[in-house]
Amino acid sequence: MNQKINIVIPMAGGDELFQRHGYPYAKSVTEIDGKPLVEHAFDCLRSIEGARFVFVIRKEDELRFHLRDMLKLLDPDAEVIRAESATAGAACTAMLAVEHIGSEEALLIANGDQLLNLDMNVALDDFRERKLDGATIVFDSVHPRWSFVKTDDSGMVIEAAEKRPISRNATAGIFYFRQGRFFLDAAQSMIRKGASVNGAYFVCPCFNEMILSQQRVGIRPIERGQYISLATPQAIEEYEQTLSARRQQRERA
């Protein structure tokens, strides 16, 4: 029997960067190779066994682009929650799904603007077999646009940071919690302390609160090429160029 896991995809961030670059649609519905960005991201997660998806979207995106209808076509069983106004970061956005985060059920929080070339079921089985309370997937980078985790000699996380390279373990926008309440408790503790970054609360630093509670947080490394962020117009344009080059190679073969 498959273990249930709630997958929350927070998508309530602003699109000012895309508007400045002249994109007519919100980031989540920007087309890449004939499909909206969010469908590409969802395709990387849809094979997860026992999954129930919860999308948290902006009110503006629902009204202007009928995003709820689109997501329901991707997964008729998905829950779609509307953020009525701007939130104070991804952690706060994810917390809007509190009614759909089972306190005892596993939780995965995943960015809605990324691609992962790996078998997520294998990764989740690894987290469960190691009896981790929390975990993230990491790749090698020192660029400060990512979140980071530092590990001890045994590979367990001892510190997490947002937009600050405290190690070479950059996180790939995937955050696992063995029970949903672990995230909720950690996020509430982080917010009470005012542990924001540039006025926003992110998911990765929740691990710091878990570590303080003596919970076990681990990592699963992947190759850099297995993770593709599509968070900016430049990243989307570069990915489209990559896809175009691959098509030309296939045509020449």
Image: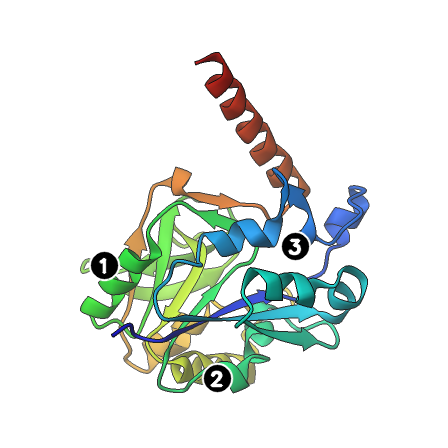
Residue drawn at x 54%, y 65% is 75
Which numbered marker is on residue 155?
1
Q: Which is in the foreground here, disc 3 or disc 2?
A: 3
Amino acid type, mark 2 = Ser
Mark earlier in primary sequence (2, 1): 1
User: Quick one: 136 or 75, which is closer to the camera?
Assistant: 75
Label 2: state its secondary structure. Answer: helix
Which residue occupies 41% across, 65% down? 175
Residue under circle 2?
Answer: 189
| In front of the other: 166 or 12 | 12
| Residue 214 coordinates in the image, percent (x, y) | 28, 80
Instruction: State the residue at coordinates (42%, 56%).
Output: 148
Q: Is residue 123 above or below residue 50?
A: above
Q: Eyeballing the image, is 233 above or below 146? A: above
In the rendered image, which residue does mark 3 sit on?
Answer: 28
> Does residue 240 appear in the picture of this structure?
yes
Residue 40's disc number: none
* Depth check, front residue: 127 or 207: 127
Q: Residues within 10 Å of mark 1 (few under 14, many from 20)?
A: few
Q: Please, what is the three-letter code of the amino acid marked with disc 1?
A: Gly
Q: Quadrant of the C terminus?
A: top left
